[in-house]
Structure formats: C-alpha cells, structure tokens
Amino acid sequence: MTDRVSIETIPNVPFVEAGHDIGDILVNALLEASIVLEENDVICIASKAISMAEGRVVLLNEVEMSKAAQEIHSKVPRKDPRTIQLMINETGDPEGSRIVLTGNHLAGWLPNGLRLTSAGVDKIDAESVILLPKDPDASAKAIGNKILSATNVNVGIVITDSDGREDKKGSTQLAIGVYGVPPLRKTTAAIATSEETLCDMLAASAALIMGQRGTNKPAVLIRGVDYTFDPNAKITEALN
C-alpha cells in the first residue's frame, strides 16, 4: 500500500456534446496540459459527461407514464412523474418494485445490482433529464483503450456518479463502471484480512476536486494507487 497519492484535475476538457469521443477529448486535454501518463495512473470521469457523449438526454414530454409511476408520484409529489417513469425504466422492472422510497429518499436498483439515488436519472432542466451510460464498464474500456492506443500506457478508468443516502444529508460519489482497476482490494493487517471497495474510494477521492455537475471538472487524474491492472475488471465484482 502506498504512502502518497496525488489527485489533480485534467484541465482543458471542453463541454461534452452528443457524438463526442471522450477518449479523444482526454488524450488532447492531457497533451495540451503537458501531462505525461504513467502506468497504473487512474482517471476518474463523471458519468454525465459520458452520458452526454452517448446521447442519453431524454425530453420529458416524450415520456409515457405508467400506473406504477403515478402511484409512486402520489407518495413523492416533489418528483416529476415522468422522471419516476424513467427511473422505473432504468431498473428494468415495469411494475416499479425495484424503486425504493425511504423517508424523503428515492432510489432504484439497477439490473446489474447497483442501487443509486433516483436510479441514476438526473435533472438537466424543467423539460429534460439525463440517464446513466448504457454500459459503464464498456464505456470505461473504450476510453482506456483509446488512451492506450495514443500513449502506450495502461491507465485505470473509473466512471463516477453522485449518490445520496437516506441516513445522511448531501451526497458523495461512487463508481458505476471500471476498466483496469479491480473494484475490490484485500488488505492484510496484524489482526485480520479485509476487503475494501477500491473503486468507490477512488471515486470519492476524485469528488474532492470534481464536485457536482456544472463545475466543468469532469475528469480527475489519481496517481500513486497500488493495484494490479486487470483489463477484465468489472463493477459487478464489487456488488452482491
């Protein structure tokens, strides 16, 4: 385990729009900032930047509501019922049984086993929302491979998303997709061996700089983390 880790913003990342290639954007941003990557560096990327590139914006006036969405809305009137419908869609269960309401906290279980606030559906404005990337692991792999092709350096990729908990105010960031970085790591101390969710620790560390959507800091470079690069790593390894 290393004694020093550095965290820095990758500057010069432009506003991402549909059709953009995040891998190309990062390669150009790193070059412009004269940042030379090292083996096993980790780049954390905000999921919404990837979602924008993948065209995951949905207009609410195009959403057809089900009875399940209307029933949940009656319990949580603060939430647009069309957004609730998209949350239901993201969970993959049309009956809405994978939507969880605890007090004022609304979350959804995704098909891969992740539980996220609002099932990862984020409001852009009064008439549009943005969904998570369709396959965050695949998105992470494509970005990692593009960087490898351009730099001949293997870097880990962690796709992050903000998430809240029903027992705490505010939010943090966690990992929803990985490439190269094993989601879990084992640590051995004098009294026991334990397993840590490395991917989430990296995501939360990146959040110290990245902040929330709108800060225009969607990519963070973390250096000094000790891990064994695994091109087959998947987020499901950290899920029950």
Image: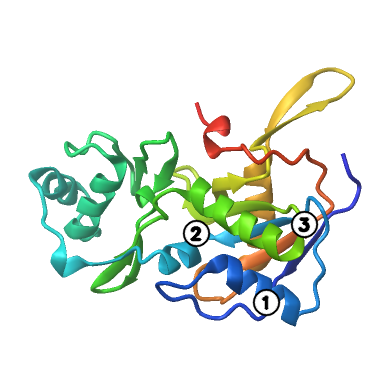
Which quarter of the image is occupied by the N terminus?
top right
Outermost residue to the left? 67
| Residue 23 seen in the current view | yes
> Looking at the rendering, which quadrant does residue 5 occupy?
bottom right
> In the drawing, does residue 177 fall left or right of residue 145?
left
The answer to whether mark 1 and mark 3 are in CB contact below 8 A is no
For image coordinates 10% across by 48% down, the residue present is: 66
Q: Nearer the viewer, mark 1 or mark 3?
A: 3
The three-letter amino acid code for the residue at tag 3 is Val
- Other-residue count near label 3 (Cα within 10 Å), few / some / many at <14 / 14–19 / ≥20: some
Q: Tell me: 1 left or right of 184.
A: right
Left or right: residue 95 compared with residue 223: left
Neighbourhood count class around disc 1 (C-alpha, 10 Å): few under 14, some 14–19, many 20 upward: some
Q: Callout 1, which amino acid?
A: Ala
Indicate the position of residue 32 as horizontal and vertical percent values. Answer: 73, 82
The residue depicted at 74 percent of the width and 52 percent of the height is 154
User: What separation in Å lies between label 2 and label 3 (alpha carbons)?
Assistant: 23 Å
Query: Which residue is farthest top?
Result: 191
Q: Is residue 182 above or below residue 65?
A: above
**For marks 2 and 3 on the same chain, the one whose residue lies earlier in the sequence:** 2
Circle 3 SS class = loop
Q: Which residue is mark 2?
A: 47
Q: Nearer the viewer, mark 2 or mark 3?
A: 3
Between 182 and 162, the one nearer to me in the picture: 182
Determine the CA span between mark 1 and mark 3.
16 Å
Q: Amino acid at mark 2?
A: Ser
User: Where is mark 3, residue-wise?
Assistant: 153
Residue designated by label 1: 29
